[in-house]
Image (cartoon, rainbow, N blue to C red):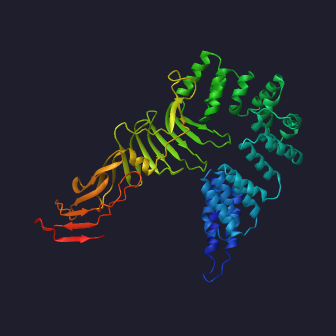
């Protein structure tokens, strides 16, 4: 409550200051912008990141006057896991304004590099880092890129220089231990590992977690156990080290299981590692029971960059939601809602050629219909399967363990307009006769047979096709129940199919109308 009061006070003071200025004053907006900057910095130092965001948003009209304001907005958005596009937008605004006070253009470039690493745009990040002055921060990011690219040789080579330049920076040891734990050491690494282990007592003062990261590199089992027991005795979070603690006997299986399921957000790989270390049927039964009532989120980080691409929601052991963020921009490309543990509705965002599509499954993976923009594509019954993932047992085997996990398919068909038309038995879209009219196109193998337009249940247009080409359309233009108008289409018009799309409705060449119903077409016009 006190934090909110301070925030309100900061904003009110700034507003009062602005309102006190005479209308004729030529205002330099930079000092005004800096007041928002100072308020946001204070909130950040107190750990109130959301309040900082609110302050900066209140003053964002002054973004063109102060680069500091936009830079801080980017920093806050990155911290609060806002969409990466909004982070980069603020960075670019700061760079374009180029008016700095507390920060600098180099600060913005470094933040841009940090942000692009999240998107795995490594080449562009490297170019930015090369333009910056050499520092521990810059070298650390360069090492991080090499680790994410799994360039072990280059990583070890640069790391050997980094530990000489920055011997007291614990980040380098933490990165090395995390990256190399599953790697075969090279001749260079056999020299680096003892060096880092010797420095542990000094480095762990700045990072108490370092000894835990170093455990896989410690040869003596008793020393490994001592490190873990000391870590546990201090009341530290045991979740990330549960598999190791089980291996060394620091924690028994039952307590490890209970500790695991205390958390509401779990890494699926960690859950599997704990399961694989259980030795008794009793422990596996306890694990299965706990898993069967789990409510929370499971994540998957397939590239081990610390940013999960997949988030799966559970309610009492049943799947409830699925999100997949392919490019890690914090805007999921695939979102799925489940009913009774099975996929029911999905949203597929545009990426890699796919349209922005809503999917409704009949019985997964059989699709009932697709909706994109204002079109609905309905396949023939049981004719189209769309499966962005396969449901498999999270651990063990189904049905012994009933909790499922969506395993991403390596190849997922792109939902292009061509693909949707190819499999559609019907396509429904807004009509053209009236605002509330609906057109239903009937197709076979992606080729239209007939298009019927209705309004409030009454047919107002029938368009006949021949071999996929529109021929003749009968219309009730005045909506009196009688089709008084016909449209004729040229014989030269192309086949309406999945290749050419559905853009045919306005390509007729002749229109004729019999307004009085005497069988004589009083109005006739040739348009082409």
Question: Residue 212, located in which quarter of the rendered image?
Answer: top right
Residue depicted at 24% across the width and 71% down the height: 525
How many numbered marks are there? 0
Q: Is residue 369 left or right of residue 245?
A: left
Where is 431 relative to 528, above or below?
above
Q: Is residue 315 visible?
A: no
Front-lying residue, 1 or 396: 396
Q: Residue extending furthest front?
A: 492
Question: Residue 483, located in which quarter of the rendered image?
Answer: bottom left
The image shows residue 434 at horizontal and vertical percentages of 28, 62
Front-lying residue, 322 or 420: 420
Q: Is residue 504 left or right of residue 244?
A: left
Residue depicted at 47% across the width and 51% down the height: 355
The image shows residue 333 at horizontal and vertical percentages of 53, 47
Q: Residue extending furthest top?
A: 281
Residue depicted at 39% across the width and 49% down the height: 421
Q: Is residue 388 visible?
A: yes
The image shows residue 75 at horizontal and vertical percentages of 68, 56
Residue depicted at 83% across the width and 55% down the height: 134
Looking at the rendering, in which quadrant would you find the C terminus? bottom left
Where is 25 relative to 265, above or below?
below
Where is 508 relative to 249, above or below?
below
The image shows residue 522 at horizontal and vertical percentages of 16, 71
């Amino acid at each position: 409550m006190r934090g909110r009061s301070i925030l309100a006070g900061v904003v009110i003071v700034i507003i009062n200051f602005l309102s006190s200025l005479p209308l004729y004053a030529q205002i330099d907006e930079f000092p005004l912008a800096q007041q928002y900057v100072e308020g946001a910095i204070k909130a950040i130092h107190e750990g109130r990141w959301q309040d900082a965001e609110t302050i900066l948003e209140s003053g964002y009209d002054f973004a063109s006057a102060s680069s500091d304001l936009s830079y801080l907005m980017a920093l806050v958005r990155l911290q609060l896991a806002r969409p990466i596009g909004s982070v980069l937008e603020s960075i670019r605004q700061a760079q374009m304004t180029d008016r700095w006070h507390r920060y600098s253009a180099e600060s913005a470039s470094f933040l841009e590099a940090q942000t692009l690493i999240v998107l795995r745009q490594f080449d562009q990040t490297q170019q930015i880092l090369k333009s910056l002055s050499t520092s521990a921060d810059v070298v650390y990011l360069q090492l991080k890129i090499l680790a994410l690219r799994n360039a072990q040789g280059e990583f070890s080579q640069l790391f050997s220089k980094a530990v000489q330049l920055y011997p007291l920076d614990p980040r380098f040891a933490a990165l090395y231990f995390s990256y190399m734990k599953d790697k075969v050491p090279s001749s260079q690494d056999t020299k680096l590992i003892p060096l880092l282990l010797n420095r542990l007592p000094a480095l762990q003062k700045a990072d108490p977690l370092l000894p835990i990261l170093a455990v896989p590199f410690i040869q003596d089992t008793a020393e490994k156990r001592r490190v873990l027991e000391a870590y546990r005795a201090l009341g530290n979070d045991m979740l990330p080290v549960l598999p190791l603690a089980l291996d060394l006997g620091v924690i028994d299986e039952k307590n490890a299981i209970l500790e695991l399921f205390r958390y509401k957000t779990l890494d699926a790989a960690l859950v599997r590692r704990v399961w694989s270390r259980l030795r008794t049927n009793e422990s596996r039964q306890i694990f299965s029971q706990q898993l069967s009532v789990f409510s929370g989120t499971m994540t998957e980080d397939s590239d081990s960059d610390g940013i999960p691409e997949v988030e799966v929601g559970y309610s009492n052991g049943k799947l409830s939601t699925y999100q997949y963020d392919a490019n890690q921009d914090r805007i999921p490309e695939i979102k799925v809602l489940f009913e009774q543990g099975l996929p029911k509705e999905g949203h597929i965002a545009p990426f890699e050629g796919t349209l922005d599509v809503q999917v409704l499954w009949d019985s997964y993976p059989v699709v009932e219909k697709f909706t994109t923009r204002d079109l609905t594509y309905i396949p023939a019954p049981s004719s189209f399967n769309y499966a962005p993932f396969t449901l498999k047992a999270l651990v063990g085997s189904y049905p012994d363990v009933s909790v499922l996990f969506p395993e991403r398919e390596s190849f997922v068909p792109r939902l292009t307009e061509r693909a949707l038309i190819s499999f559609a038995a019907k396509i429904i879209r807004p009509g053209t006769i009236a605002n509330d009219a609906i057109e239903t196109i009937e197709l076979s193998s992606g080729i239209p047979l007939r298009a019927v337009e209705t309004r409030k249940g009454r047919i107002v247009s029938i368009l006949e096709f021949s071999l996929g080409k529109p021929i003749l359309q009968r219309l009730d233009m005045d909506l009196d129940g009688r089709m008084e108008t016909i449209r004729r289409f040229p014989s030269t018009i192309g086949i309406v199919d999945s290749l050419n799309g559905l853009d045919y409705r306005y390509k007729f060449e002749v229109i004729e109308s019999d307004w009085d119903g005497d069988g004589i077409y009083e109005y006739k016009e040739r348009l082409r």
